[in-house]
Image (cartoon, rainbow, N blue to C red):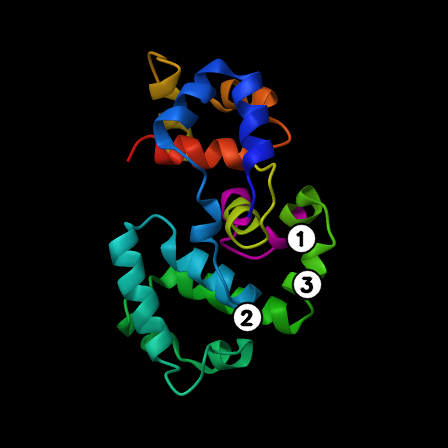
Amino acid sequence: MDYSVAVAVLKKSDPIMASVIEQVGSCKLDQVQQTGDLLFSLSRAILYQQLSGKAAAAIHHRFLQLYADKPFPTPQDILNTSDESLREVGISRPKIVYLKDLAQKILDGLPTLTDLEAMEDEAIIKTLTQVKGIGCWTVQMLLIFRLHRWDVLPVDDLGIRSGIRRVYSLPELPDKKTVQHLGQNWKPYCTIASWYLWRCQE
């Protein structure tokens, strides 16, 4: 994927972002894009909520092992799995509710990834946040890492906020309004700016 136009626009519109880009180097967002259908993507997102990457990856792996005879469970498979079995692989009770609600909503006709690709970002957020446990941030991660949308700014993301605090030398973490205000300089490439803000802290 060619990010050169996006990077050029960001450098021109924001000198501080330009220095971050110089520091981090070329954008490699395409190397961390995810695969799988909507059920795979959102169930993974649910399991990763509020956990360290390492702990979440272990639980996600054990969850997939429950359906080792398949590439990935179907919504019906998840609904047929007892809560006890899901608890045994380390999934919390609230997240079991979320997973089963997701599975049921997919059976009831939640749009597929192909359907979502034809929709605007805001419409996707409105549609998917109807699933229990799926908030705006989770859908924004799907927009960035699965649907390859280029103008997403997750204003509530701690990594984005701490990245902004660091590179703009702010005394404390910026609030939502400050993030949105800065983000005006990055349009229509807020996703690319977000990736640089995440990377500049590594």
Give the left or right position of residue 196, taking residue 187 as reference: left
Q: Does the magenta stretch include residue 129?
A: yes
Q: Count up the numbered dots.
A: 3
Q: Distance between the residues labelled 2 and 1?
A: 15 Å
Q: Name the residue under label 2.
A: 103
Q: What stretch is highlighted in magenta?
A: 126-139
Q: Which mark is residue 114?
A: 3
Q: Position of residue 177 (x, y in %)?
A: 54, 20
Q: Which mark is residue 127?
A: 1
Q: Which residue is drawn at 57% across and 57% down?
A: 131
Mark 2 Cα-neighbour bin, 10 Å: few <14, some 14–19, many ≥20? many
Q: Position of residue 195 (x, y in %)?
A: 45, 37
Give the left or right position of residue 17, taking residue 52 as reference: right
The amino acid pointed to by label 3 is Thr
Q: Check if mark 2's residue and mark 3's residue have beta carbons within 8 Å.
A: no
The amino acid pointed to by label 1 is Thr
Dot 1 falls on a residue whose secondary structure is helix
Q: Which of marks 2 and 3 is nearer the N terminus?
A: 2
Front residue of this view, candidates 57 and 21 = 21
Front residue of this view, candidates 153 and 192 = 192
Residue 38 vertical position relative to residue 146 in the rendered view, above or below: below
Quadrant showing the C terminus: top left
Residue 60 vertical position relative to residue 27 in the rendered view, above or below: below
